Amino acid sequence: MRFGVIGAGKIGQLRARSLKEDANCELVAVLDIDQQLAAKAAAGTVARVCTRDDDFFSVPLDAVIVSSPIQLHEAHCTSAFAAGCHVLVEKPMSNSVESARRIVAAAEQAKRALGVGFNLRYYPSVAFVKDAVMNGSIGQLDHIRVFGGHDGLHNFAADWQYKAPVSGGGAMWDVGIHMSDVARFLMGDITEVYGSLADRVLGVPGSEDIAQAVYRSPSGVSASYEATWTEWKGYQFYVEAYGDKGMARGAYAPMQSLLITQDAPGKPRRRQRNLYPQIMVREKLYTWQSTALLSFKEELADFLKLVGGDNSVRIADGHDGLRSIELADAVRRSTQTREAVHLAPLGRMGRT
């Protein structure tokens, strides 16, 4: 499959590398306004190095990975669909609900696959929790907890990454967008939201530095959610799933997971703790990017299956990307009205 990559920044470089190392893919074009970055991403391939959209889309392509700044996602996605390409777009899918809906509509009109880069689904600790839910290890799912945060604006390379309205919003649109997706990944669709957000610490207008919410699924499963830019301990996330026979926990950084099970309430408990020392050592040598790269490779393999019509894969699709943005918008609206916000059910794309 012939791929093009739009955006050759830090993430775009990793995306390009994942393509180079997949025998089922060929990198044939890279687009970035910085020609040196585009050339770096294309190195070792026959890919055309482009600095203009028209030059990029003149190359015969089957699929495009969009890793450009968020304010350009809609234009790049819709151009790719108009060219007959499948699209894998970085999170957040766009910077507004309306824009995200237009991207989904363009994918549906073009009858092309749309994947969204929620690569935490492929982190071993998150996958461990998902497996525990799916295989019945913790019994019937009752509720979950998700948390994601880091320690401030110094983590961003440019102000467009955190300043609304270009960024879409604050903590919920940054690390928090991943946590909203992880919640949906574990509990299924989310149709009720009650939450509160604020920007009292960092004071960036329209960009919350703390967001807390309760999500509910149509079946009544609930999730407590928190996203923050004022986590003094630095970057970290965790997810916990609780059932009637146990609980599973996944966290990063460092990567770790925990499973506690019992046959019935009050019965003896069994513990399984995983510390992933090989990941810790690899990240000491090659940084967090080595873990992200492996997740991108797994996500790419699932994207190829999605293109082939397999909707059972773990990759997030356009509806997952849209719902994560609708959740961020719903918490903002709930903060203003102090009431719960109800969302229409939204399954996977291509399913009724």
Image: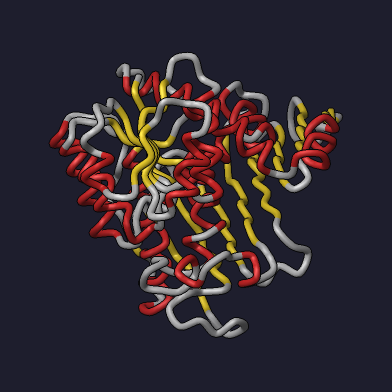
Check the image and report above or below for 269 versus 227: above
Check the image and report above or below for 56 versus 268: below
Write the residue at 76% across / 30% down: 261
Question: Is 335 displayed left or right of 131 in the figure?
Answer: left
Question: Is 242 displayed left or right of 41 in the figure?
Answer: right
Residue 319 image offset from top left, x and y in percent? 32, 42
Residue 133 image offset from top left, x and y in percent? 59, 30
| Image quarter hosting the N terminus | top left
Residue 202 image offset from top left, x and y in percent? 60, 81
Check the image and report above or below for 152 versus 269: below
Write the residue at 49% across / 48% down: 37
Looking at this view, name the residue that lies furthest to the top. Answer: 23
Question: Is 272 displayed left or right of 225 in the figure?
Answer: right
Rendering colour mode:
secondary structure
Q: As rendered, which of 8 and 105 lies closer to the eye?
A: 8
Residue 268 image offset from top left, x and y in percent? 86, 29
Looking at this view, name the residue that lies furthest to the left. Answer: 109
Q: Can residue 317 be seen from the camera position used here?
A: yes
Question: Is 85 displayed left or right of 260 in the figure?
Answer: left
| Image quarter hosting the C terminus | top left
Res 262 quadrant in image: top right
Res 293 quadrant in image: top right
Write the residue at 25% across / 31% down: 59
